Image (spheres, rainbow, N blue to C red):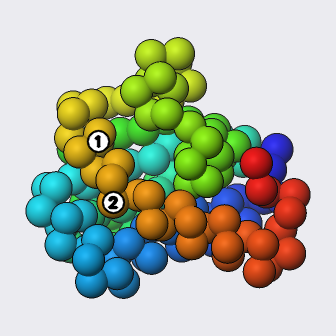
């Protein structure tokens, strides 16, 4: 298990979406996607709903404030961590069952170019934080 606990996973996985929201070039593409993405992460357990339109992140399953998701992803924290380092092909991971997708795969694939610059920043953040244990 790459992350020490749910708080650790939440910190790093939420940070990548926040980086996209904060980037003036990436943010409009995220908002235009129309997606509200619910991630059901295991090992450790984490539920995160990311509203790409309104650019908000909700963690937990029962806070009541999270909007209704129109796409769901089920994956391990390790798979998410490796994706944000550019080490996971989403279509291949879906085909292999490493990512369980509820929703339209083409919509998710359309966002992948926006992930590239965030992936580079994610790896740099891990290195700066001394988290070599998370670098794939």
Q: Kindly identify which residue carries mark 2.
A: 114
SS at circle 1? helix
Quarter in which the N terminus is drawn:
top right
Residue 60: image location, x then y, percent: 51, 60
Residue visible at 86% across and 63% down in the picture:
132
Residue 73: image location, x then y, percent: 42, 38
Q: Is residue 93 above or below residue 109?
A: above
1 or 2: mark nearer the eye? 2
Separation (CA) of disc 1 from disc 2? 11 Å
Q: Is residue 123 left or right of residue 97?
A: right
Residue visible at 35% across and 48% down in the picture:
112
Residue visible at 77% across and 80% down in the picture:
128
In which quadrant of the rendered view does residue 53 lie?
Answer: bottom left
Residue 44: image location, x then y, percent: 72, 47
In which quadrant of the rendered view does residue 133 lie?
Answer: bottom right
Q: Is residue 56 above or below residue 69?
A: below
Seen from the viewer's position, the closer of residues 99 and 10 is 99
Instruction: State the count of labels.
Output: 2
SS at circle 2? helix
Q: Kindly identify which residue carries mark 1.
A: 108
Seen from the viewer's position, the closer of residues 20 and 49 is 20
Residue visible at 45% across and 76% down in the picture:
19
């Amino acid at each position: 298990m790459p992350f020490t606990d749910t708080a650790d996973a939440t910190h790093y996985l939420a940070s990548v979406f926040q980086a996209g929201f904060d980037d003036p070039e990436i943010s409009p593409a995220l908002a235009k996607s129309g997606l509200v993405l619910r991630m059901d992460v295991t090992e450790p357990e984490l539920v995160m709903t990311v509203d790409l339109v309104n650019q908000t992140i909700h963690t937990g399953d029962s806070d009541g404030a999270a909007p209704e998701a129109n796409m769901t992803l089920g994956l391990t924290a390790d798979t998410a961590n490796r994706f944000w380092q550019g080490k996971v092909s989403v279509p291949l991971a879906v085909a292999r069952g490493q990512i369980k997708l509820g929703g339209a795969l083409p919509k998710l694939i359309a966002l992948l170019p926006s992930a590239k610059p965030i992936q580079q920043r994610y790896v740099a953040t891990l290195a700066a934080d001394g988290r070599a244990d998370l670098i794939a």
